Image: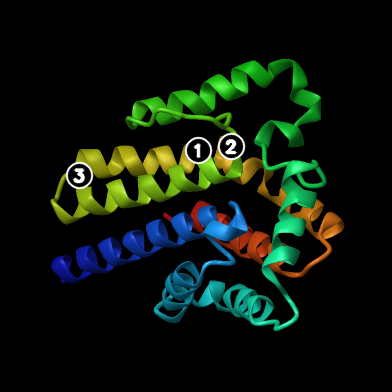
């Protein structure tokens, strides 16, 4: 029974790690994600193998939006530029905490501290970019899965607690605002559908025990 429970937890964490990673990539340049056939095959395969019923609706919506024949690579590139490069929907945590603008430096340092604690060195983007935060969540899930699989209880607990704190103090603290902004500013349905799935996953993860 213990082995079955352990195996189930490892499987769940590994799946979430994969999903976080794919969602992070889907919010990057379209030519490396939403316009790339290999990426789409990996994404759809992950959707098809899910056993997380709470995410099925959002996954189906993403598949539907990506299946629209009218969407071209040029349209995706234009939407990406509109939303993320021109600032219609900033992909940075600190952009959604104007009342805490005085503490932006501290917030960035805190996020960077999480990354450093798990051996991550940030390059190019500031640490509060949504892609960076989603990739970090994926890494924590994967590290926790490996710890559980090898019966390393202390290491697994560290990863679990880091996930909870990071969601509470960072990713989970601004993702709803990002989701609302995305729905307001997007001209295509695909990015809001991805944002909805990200929000659903983060909410689900934050509630898990």
Which is nearer the eye, 91 or 85?
A: 85
Q: Residue at x 66, y 59 (%)?
A: 195
Give the side of residue 101 with respect to residue 197, left or right: right
Q: Around disc 1, counting alpha carbons within 10 Å, would you say few (fewer than 14), some (14 to 19), or many (20 or more)? A: some
User: In which quarter of the view is residue 115 placed?
Assistant: top left
Q: Which circle, 1 or 3, is nearer the viewer?
A: 1
**Mark 2: secondary structure:** helix
**Mark 3: secondary structure:** helix
The residue furthest front is 74
Q: Residue at x 76, y 70 (%)?
A: 189
Quarter that holds the C terminus: bottom left
Which is nearer the eye, 88 or 13?
A: 88
Using the image, determine if residue 129 lies above or below residue 1: above
Give the side of residue 60 with respect to residue 48, left or right: right
Q: Residue at x 49, y 25 (%)?
A: 112
**Image mark for residue 166:** 1
Whether residues under marks 2 and 3 lie with C-beta atoms below 8 angstroms apart, the answer is no
Q: Around disc 2, counting alpha carbons within 10 Å, would you say few (fewer than 14), some (14 to 19), or many (20 or more)? A: some
Count of numbered tags: 3
Q: Which residue is mark 2?
A: 170
Quarter that holds the N terminus: bottom left
Give the Cα distance between marks 1 and 3.
20 Å
Give the Cα distance between marks 2 and 3.
25 Å
Q: Position of residue 6 (x, y in %)?
A: 21, 63
Among numbered discs 2 and 3, the one appearing first in the sequence: 3
**Image mark for residue 153:** 3
Give the Cα distance between marks 1 and 2.
5 Å
Give the side of residue 143 with respect to residue 39, left or right: left
Residue 177 in view here: no
């Amino acid at each position: 029974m213990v082995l079955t429970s352990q195996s189930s937890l490892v499987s769940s964490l590994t799946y979430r790690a994969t999903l976080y990673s794919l969602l992070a990539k889907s919010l990057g340049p379209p030519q490396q994600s939403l316009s790339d056939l290999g990426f789409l095959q990996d994404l759809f395969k992950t959707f098809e193998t899910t056993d997380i019923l709470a995410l099925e609706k959002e996954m189906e919506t993403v598949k539907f939006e990506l299946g629209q024949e009218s969407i071209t690579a040029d349209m995706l590139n234009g939407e990406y530029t509109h939303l993320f490069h021109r600032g219609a929907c900033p992909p940075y945590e600190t952009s959604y905490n104007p009342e805490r603008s005085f503490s932006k430096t501290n917030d960035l340092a805190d996020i960077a501290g999480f990354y450093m604690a798990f051996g991550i060195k940030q390059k190019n983007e500031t640490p509060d970019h949504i892609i960076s935060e989603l990739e970090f969540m994926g890494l924590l899930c994967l590290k926790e899965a490996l710890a559980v699989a090898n019966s390393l209880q202390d290491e697994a607990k560290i990863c679990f607690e880091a996930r909870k704190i990071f969601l509470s103090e960072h990713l989970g603290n601004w993702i709803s605002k990002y989701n609302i902004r995305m729905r307001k500013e997007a001209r295509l349905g695909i990015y809001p559908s991805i944002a909805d799935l990200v929000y659903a996953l983060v909410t689900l993860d934050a509630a898990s025990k």
